[in-house]
Image (spheres, helix red, strand yellow):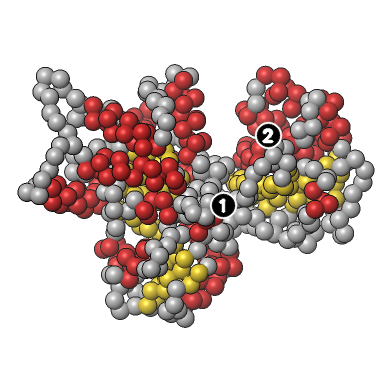
Amino acid sequence: MDKITEIRIHGRGGQGAVTTAELMAVAAFKDGKFSQAVPKFGPERRGSPVEAYCRLAKEFITLRTQVYEPDYVIVLDESLTHSLDVTTGLRKGGVILINAEGKKGFGTFPTYTVDANKIAMEILGRPIVNTIMLGAFAKATKLVTLESLVEAIGERFSGPVKEKNILAIKRAYEETKA
Amino acid sequence: MDTHIIERLSEIIADGEMDAKYVNVESEHSAMSVCLGAQATGVRTFTASSSQGLALMYEMLYIVSGMRLPVVMVNANRALSAPLNIWNDWSDSFGARDSGWIQLYCESAQEALDTVIQAYKIAEDARVRLPVMVCIDGFFLSHVYEPVDIPDAQAVGKFLPKFAGPVIDFDKPVSQGMWAGPECYQDFKKEQNDAMIRAMEVIHEINKEFKEQFGRGYGNGFIETYNMENAKYALITMGSLAGTAKHVIRENKIHDVGLIRIKSFRPFPFAEIKKAIKDVHALGVLEKNLSPGLGGALCHEVRGMVKTKNVSSFIGGLGGRDVKIDDFMKIFDDIRHEKKELVWV
């Protein structure tokens, strides 16, 4: 079996970290990959640090543990980096994508920064950044396609929420510089 | 946990996509009571529960199986309090082990779906007429997003035709769940046990039939073996643990250890397990369950039938503790070294 690609998403309860993992899994499946999304088995309270995971592979994934050594880390909320080390277990050469205003660095790990809050406030009117981060992730990593993400969002949401999220994800895709 | 299942079902029924009546109740005890009453009139029933909810159903579980009602439920396996814990282990359904329900444990979301379809056919077979509990690991399977092939409704309808009864007949009234004194109670229990034993052949047949029609089968219906061809050692486990075990065996190219996944915990497939382990030197049982004062209940059942080989006992994953890749490597080593003492993973 080819190696499984593992992604860890850090967020705060209510920011949609679990939804991020689920949408990524659905989009990757639409791209022709096998995928698996699971939440971290821990307390889920609004505002508290939460994690969710996504696995991508060419074959059906039977591994059913939590993710400990991810290849990619997505950070939905910059303030999390003050209280926890988001690089824990990150594999050598692992990539970080973080929602932050300025440029951020994590040692030797290649890091992509996107001001997702700004896009979210402008398009969604609320600081919900999960879909925006998926757009940025698609651009930065090419692990999922923008088309499949848009399709996955289209199935998950409806009405203006759907339209705005699709707009936001496309803008994040445009604005993220690889 | 189970709430996902029930919430989605309520939407499907409210949208008119499913011809069913959705009954809101105030407790799990009532949920199973409603299934009991509805099933006795001659309709298919379904509910889902887990943990404390299943514990609250306990009284009704025995009555449903004793009345030989083919109710089907999904239990998203979770720990029992105290201490308060909402995560996965098998404490809840192991507590209902002797309630007379067929218990089938699944490894993937796909298997969970396929097993629910099969469960009705097993439960309603005239040779069986027993309720079926489809057990899925809480969170590991209840909260996973992964590819699932949803079979066509028409194909499912062909495999599982409309409920054929018995249906309540007002012209020929009968009493169900009646008083049975010392002169006959035991006979009813013997019949229940006989039905459970007959369920073995039915489970086997239906797994085969399902595979022929949908292209997916799960071992022989009771157990599934993996990497056992040249194995000197065997790990026996159930549920989602088996998926990780397969991954570890495959990724590390392990040849000497094979896996036996028990799908049917009740009825317990003694003969099938015996056959599967006949060429191994030693084996181990990994389970997310504890019978305080005994150890692992699943291991105890395996030891009861394996007198000449060492059976190492591993308890892990209680209250959601993750059984990791490295844990499996250590477990395989302990099995090879014929570990005697109970190992807490």
User: Residue A70: percent from the left, percent from the top?
Assistant: 71, 55
Rounded to the nearest angstrom, the CA distance separating label 2 from label 1 is 20 Å
User: Share a chain, discs 2 and 1?
Assistant: yes
* Secondary structure at numbered mark 1: loop
| Residue A83 appears left or right of A104 | left
User: Residue B213: percent from the left, percent from the top?
Assistant: 35, 39
* Secondary structure at numbered mark 2: helix
| Residue A95 appears left or right of A51 | right
Pointer 1 residue: A61
Pointer 2 residue: A148
Q: Residue at x 17, y 33 (%)?
A: B176
Above or below for B291 versus B188: below
In this view, the residue farthest toward the right is A102
Above or below for A121 versus A141: above
Q: Residue at x 87, y 59 (%)?
A: A107
Q: Residue at x 30, y 37 (%)?
A: B71
For label 1, the crowd category at 10 Å Cα-Cα, with few meaning under 14, some 14 to 19 and many 20 or more, is many
In this view, the residue farthest toward the bottom is B337
- Amino acid type, label 2: Ser
- Amino acid type, label 1: Ile
For label 2, the crowd category at 10 Å Cα-Cα, with few meaning under 14, some 14 to 19 and many 20 or more, is many
Q: Chain of mark 1?
A: A
- Circles 2 and 1: CB atoms closer than 8 Å: no
| Residue in front for this viewpoint, A126 or B260 | A126
